[in-house]
Amino acid sequence: MDRILDDREKRYNEVLNLIDKTGNIVVCGKVNYPGVDKCNPYIQKAFEILKEALLASFKIDDYAVLKGYDGPAIIFSSNLKISDTKRTAVKIEEEHPLGRIFDIDVYRADGSPISRTELDFPYRKCIICGKNAKICVRQRAHDINEVIGKINSIIENY
């Protein structure tokens, strides 16, 4: 678990470095997947699909793929308005067949993330019950194997 947390910190530092380098906002995309095995074939397949969706939606060609114990992530800068960038990210999360398992964060030039609620988007829904996902995670409302099974099934059926 410590390696996963270390990788999250490294990823955030890469976000900050890209902000410093470009002066633009930064987008970071990864796959939402519980547990400690974040580099399995399911994640790899879903990540490649996420990467293609992001590249097509943002029409970018300069990006970095980060790999580590927290799973793969893609980061790139955007010169769009932050609200337009977040709207595009949420559209992918809401409308793409695998969007529910995508986690696309948008960071301001000061390094702080913009939340869905700041733009009046609804909370993310739990993949199992449809309630607020943050509450289900916090309360550990569902067995981790049930969540992993559901995610794997979604990926397999894509």
Image (tube, rainbow, N blue to C red):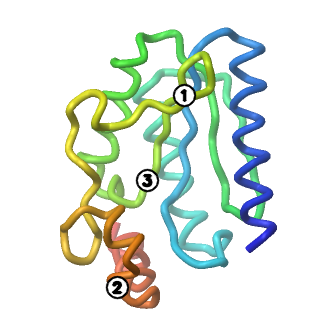
Q: Say which quarter of the image contains residue 75.
A: top right
Q: Which residue is mark 1?
A: 107
The earlier-in-sequence mark between 3 and 2 is: 3
Which residue is the site of mark 3?
102
Q: What type is the residue that disc 3 sits on?
A: Phe
Image spot of residue 57 (x, y percent): 40, 29
Amino acid type of disc 1? Tyr
Who's the residue at 43% across and 78% down the image?
152
Q: Secondary structure at mark 1?
A: strand
Q: Which residue is mark 2?
A: 142
Question: Going 68% across and 70% down the picture, which residue do you hit?
Answer: 39
* Residue depth check, mark 3 versus mark 1: number of the one nearer the observer: 1
What type is the residue that disc 2 sits on? His
Which image quarter holds the C terminus?
A: bottom left
Answer few, some or many: residues within 10 Å of disc 3's Cα (few below 14, many 20 plus, some between 14 and 19): many
Q: Nearer the viewer, mark 3 or mark 2?
A: 2
Secondary structure beneath dot 2 equals loop
Element class at badge 3: strand
Image location (x, y in percent) of residue 80: 45, 11
Inter-mark Cα distance, 3 to 1: 16 Å
User: Counting residues from the N terminus, which is met first, the one under dot 1 or under dot 2?
Assistant: 1
